Structure formats: structure tokens, C-alpha cells
Image: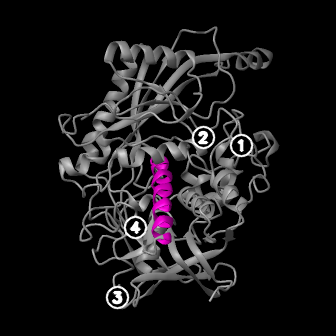
Amino acid sequence: MPSANHFDAIVIGSGISGGWAAKELCEKGLKTLVLERGRNVEHIKDYQGTEKEPWELEHRNSITQEDKKNSPIQSKCYAYDEVSKKFFVNDLENPYVATKPFDWIRGNHVGGRSLMWGRQSYRLSDLDFEANAKDGYGTDWPIRYNDLAPWYSYVEKFAGISGNRDGVFNLPDGEFQPPMEMNVVEKMVALNLKTKMGRPMIIGRSANHTAKIGTRGPCQFRNKCHQGCPFGGYFSSNAATLPAAAATGNLTLRPDAITTEILYDKETGRAKGVRILDANTNLTEEYFAKIVFLNASTLGTAHILLSSVSEVFPNGFGNSSLQVGHNLMDHHYGVGAYGDYDGFQDVYTYGRRPNGIYIPRFRNLDGGSSAGYLRGFGYQGGASRNRGEGNGIGVELKESVTEPGKWSIGWGSWGEHLPYYENKVTLDKNKKDKWGLAALNIDCEFKENEMKMRIDMRNSGAEMLEAAGIKNVGSYDNMPAPGFCIHEMGTARMGKDPKTSVLNKWNQMHEAKNVFITDGSAMASSACQNPSLTYMALTARAADFAVSELKKGNL
């Protein structure tokens, strides 16, 4: 019997994948409830501070000792500043246990990390979808590039991805808005890398809009994206998918709703709904629906599944395979190279381009291990001019710092992390959060393959700069812990065999056909590209399938 607690669909999470699930399900006519564990954030209205320059802010856009005390993990993130810190969790109120070092960067609010993400948007290729099958790490993806290609195109057109059609076989082209432009040093380096080493260097493919999409954009080249964009100059749930969902009249958004359990109906073999805890009142409520999309982020989704224990699922919802929480991956980065260039002193840059260059993967392109390790890596970075050197005193000093200094260039590398079963998350009954819920215990590390790759990442970064004519080349390896790249994935992976995976080729749970998981949890391997575009495509594809199956009476 219909009631205020009954819907056609429930979506758990409002980040990049949850926003897409909401849009697609609402536009297909389903009355959809979106549950978000954090507070509401309204587009434009709740971006206070982004209109100010650093000198107009109390702490000049720096973070305080109190910030570091309350959020020792979050405050390490490059995007955490005086304005954006409101989009990051308080670490003291949201504890977790790290058996091995792990930095869990997150934001609990409507829009999730779609407000703070890096916006780099790349397709995976069959080099990535076939990797597990070829080298035996992880289980074979149940899909290939051709299965996802039309959905990549579909989401790119709505999301608004700027870039070039570069013709790189292992980095498929997409549906792009006009590209941003490389500066003069980047163009020189790109030409030298192409002619001397045969390696492409391209402008980054970014979800910053270079053309208007409806009421969104274009990008104003402020480079304050992580603070929220009042111009809608980049893709976020708040600016794009949630407004589209709301426009249908089918969306109900419920912030401050912590999903504690997926409710299972033993008679039907389906999920019947969810139980939530009100983050403000600590009261519980139940909501019911025909289908459930779980998009709470890789670690959040694992937490919900593992917490949903029943007679049928004593190890967690849909976890007869014992794969839930396992195969956790992140990209490893914090390694790269840098240098100076003396020329082009009469050329400068325009604006603050919120994008950089990208060097696609060039190792093991045959799928083998000729480099001495499996898989590969890419680079992101760029060239810029610093201020003048600040010589002299008084007027002389002031004038010298108003002049541009030398050109410099640097790039860092993002490497693939293999899916290891022993990299996992579990519930820690001895550690509770402020609501009395069990914290996650995260046990994850980079292993020998990643360490061998990092040597090559560092050396190759320096080698390419030297070949491109850059001087004073140096390199580094800061070795941040897993999690710090904020690309965690893999805890409820797709696969062909229910014994070794959690989801089928439609992102549908093997053991509960009306539950779909399309966030990073679903990834069977990590590739080395930024993954968010793949989450979008998987979500749109799964939503289309789910509604079709619902109409056929199969769900």
C-alpha cells in the first residue's frame, strides 16, 4: 500500500554516481528517494567564501591548528582550505581503524566529493578491461569497452568534458567540448616528446566546461573548483544531475539519513528497502522500494553491506562469495619530476586554468610485463611562471616581485594498483562513531608490483623532461599511503562468477537482483586513469537496464 515511506527506487548516496542514478531513474519515471548521510548543500547558496580572494578571508585561505586537530586526515588533502573545509568530514566524529596506513578523504553532504573532485575524466580501454584475464590478477571484467562506449558518450554529453580527440589507442576519444589550451612551454615539451620519444602529451580531459550547457558554465578560469562553483563551471551532482532529477517532480531528497542496513525479504529473494538513522535525532526509519541503487562510495558501500546481517546473509548482504570489502584498490601517486626552462621570457599565461597536461600510459601496452612489472601509469602536471626572484629592498624589491620569473614545469604520476584479495575492509566492533555505529577497519597496502612501478614512474618522469629540453631536472617520491589519491575502489566487484564477485555485468547483485551498485565498489581493476567518468557510465547503463527489467516484471 503506497505511503510516505514507499518509493519506486531508493538511491543511497548523492555523489557522482548517486547523482547520476537519481537523474536517470527520475527521468525514466520512477519516484525516487535519495538518501544522503550528511547535510544538505544547495547549489550556489552554500558555496559561501568562494567569491572572496585570500586577503579577504580571516586566515588568508590557510587552515588553522584547530582544523588540523579536528581533521588530521582531511587537512592533508590538496583541496582542503579555509573555504572548502566545510565539505570535508570531522575526523574525530568519523573515526576508522587503519591496520596499515590509509588516508580516507571524504565529504558527507549532498553532492559528496563531486564538489571537491579533480575533474579529470578519462575512458578506460580494452587494455584495462582485459588486463585481469591476461595476467591473472583479479577476476575477469564481465564487460568490455564496446559495452560501455555508448554510455561513456551519453554521460560525456551531459556532464560536459573538455578535451581533444587525440587518437591514442589506449585512451579512447570521447564527446568533447573545445579543449583548453596548453601554454607555450607545454606545447614545446609536447612536440619534443612526440618527435624524440614518440610519446603523446595532451591537454587534460576535464569536466570543466569550455562551453555553456543549459544554465551551466562556462568555466571562468578561477581555479577555485573545490570550493563550489557559483557559475556551474564544472560538473557536480549539485549543479547538474540532482537539479535534472528534481525537474522531473519524481525526486525526494533526504539529507542527514545514515543508511544502516539493507532490508532483505527472504520470501522474494529481493531487497525490500533500507533502514536509516537520522543523523540529528538518532531515530530510525524504514523506507521501501522496488529497486535499490547503492552509491555510498567504495568504503561507505562496503560498510552498509557488511552491516546488513541476516539469517540468509550472516557475513553481510549479498556476501556469500566473501568478496565484499575485499580487493580494495587506490592509485599510487606522489612520485614525479620537475625542472626549469629559461626561454619564452616574453610570453605569459592567461587566467588560472583549472586543468593540466596528461601523458597517457606508455608501458606494457601489449598487456605483458616487459617493463619488469604488470600494468602501467600516466602523468599529470603542467608548466607555469613564478613571480620574480624578489631582489633588492624597498621599491626595488616590490618592483621585482611584480615581474614574472622563470618558467618551471612538473608532473606527477598515477599508477595502477593491482586487486589483491587481502587488501580489505572489515567492521571493527571495538571502535564506534558518534552515532554508536561500528567503524571500518581498513587493511590495505601497495605491494611489490607497485614498488617496482614507482621506480620507473620516477625515472621516466625525469628522463622525459630532460629529453624535452628542460634544465635543473629533479625527481621525488613522497610515497603517500593508500587512500590519499582519493580513488579508492573495488570492494564489491563485478565479475562473471558469483563465487568470486558480487555484481554481474549489469552492476546487479548476484544474490539480490533488485540491488545495483555503481560506485567505485564495482571496479574489478583500477587501471591508471581517473575513474569517475567510468562510474558515471556504469551508473547510466545500470539504471537503463534496471528500469527495463522492472517494466518486464523481472524485479
| Label pair 1/3, CB-CB below 8 angstroms | no
Tag 3, which secondary structure? loop
The residue depicted at 50 percent of the width and 52 percent of the height is 536
Can you identify the residue that label 1 sits on? 216
Find residue 178 and report its horizontal and vertical position in percent: 60, 28
| Label pair 2/1, CB-CB below 8 angstroms | yes
Query: Few, some or many C-alpha atoms within 10 Å of disc 1 (few <14, some 14-19, many ≥20)?
Result: many
Can you identify the residue that label 3 sits on? 312
Q: Counting residues from the N terminus, which is met first, the one under dot 2 or under dot 3? A: 2
| Label pair 4/1, CB-CB below 8 angstroms | no
Find residue 92 and report its horizontal and vertical position in percent: 58, 70
Q: Nearer the viewer, mark 3 or mark 4?
A: 4
The quadrant of the image that shows the N terminus is bottom right
The residue depicted at 32 percent of the width and 53 percent of the height is 143
Within the magenta stretch, is there residue 461?
no
The residue depicted at 46 percent of the width and 81 percent of the height is 271
Q: Counting residues from the N terminus, which is met first, the one under dot 1 or under dot 3? A: 1
Work out how far the residue at label 2 is from the one at label 4, CA to CA, in angstroms. 27 Å
Find residue 307 and report its horizontal and vertical position in percent: 44, 80
Which numbered disc covers residue 160? 2
Name the amino acid, label 1: Arg
Q: Counting residues from the N terminus, which is met first, the one under dot 2 or under dot 4? A: 2
Q: Is residue 326 left or right of residue 261?
A: left
Span shown in magenta = 531-551
